[in-house]
Amino acid sequence: MRRPLIAGNWKMNLTRSEAVALAEAVAKQADQYPTVDIAVCPPFVYLEAVGRAIAGSRVALGAQNMYPEPSGAFTGEISPMMLCEMGCRYVILGHSERRQWLGETDSFINKKVHAALKAGLQPIVCLGEQLAEREAGHTLEVIRAQFEGSLAGLTAQQMIQTVIAYEPVWAIGTGKVATPHQAEEVHLELRKLIAQRYNPEIAQQVVIQYGGSVKPDNAQELFAQPDIDGALVGGASLKPDQFLGIIAGMKK
Ligand code: PEP
């Protein structure tokens, strides 16, 4: 059966020493939550230092992005193998900030997903609708298109290795969280899409996180939904007490 995953997306924040201190604080408490998988995703340049800070703990390392080619003339980019060498288990792909500000498309994200899986990394694939799309009643349509595009061509085994993060764009960094009902509706739809493409057993094994202004005071009601398997956390993952407070909300 699937295990919930709570991952911190630190984005482009923190100094090196702040990153190490945060990682150490999370690692120190992680043993208290044996039923939850925990990951931190620092900026590339802190991966090695953070990896050392969490070594031997239950906290896994993740990156925030990668390039889909194994090596070559791609100035400024980072390959899947480089992330493996740094000790990464996860890589966040298709975050809405990258879709919005860096022009990432579903087909480019799909290439990255395949490259990550081939390298033995677990992709955390983000998808979610814009506010205007929700208001126009198009949420499920948008989710279906992103699912089909960014997760095209995966074998059943690769689908199980992949984490999906449903992140409504209007809830990211805004303090506006989706209601448990709004989030559960999309998570259930995603599970239906997986069941249709593979089968219901596969669908039951895929971890689907919610992301968007998750805080200790709203985590528990989100996590109480049957199809929400943890969270991808931005702002609140930068404060150890808040991140740990969210993890504590995971009782499943
Ligand atoms: C995110 O960026 O993935 C995110 C969920 O951010 P926040 O928790 O700050 O809304």
Image: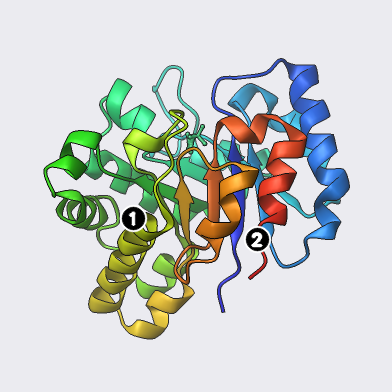
x and y, in percent, of residue 233 in the image: 56, 41
Amino acid residing under circle 1: Gln
Q: Nearer the viewer, residue 70 or 12?
A: 12
Q: Is residue 217 above or below residue 199?
A: above
- Is any atom of residue 19 visible in this view? yes
Question: Disc 1 or 2, which lies upstream in sequence?
Answer: 1
Identity of the residue drawn at 35% across and 83% down: 200
Is 4 on the left-hand or right-hand side of 181? right
Identity of the residue drawn at 59% across and 63% down: 4
Residue 182: which numbered mark, if any? 1
Report how far apart the C-alphas of labels 1 and 2 lie in the structure. Answer: 19 Å
- Is any atom of residue 55 visible in this view? no
Q: Badge 2 is on which residue? A: 250
Residue 243 position by quadrant = top right
Amino acid residing under circle 2: Met
| Residues under numbered marks 1 and 2 in contact, where contact means CB atoms less than 8 Å apart | no
Residue 206 position by quadrant = bottom left
Of the 4 image quadrants, the one containing the C terminus is bottom right
> Label 2: few (<14), some or many (≥20) within 10 Å?
many
x and y, in percent, of residue 5 in the image: 60, 57
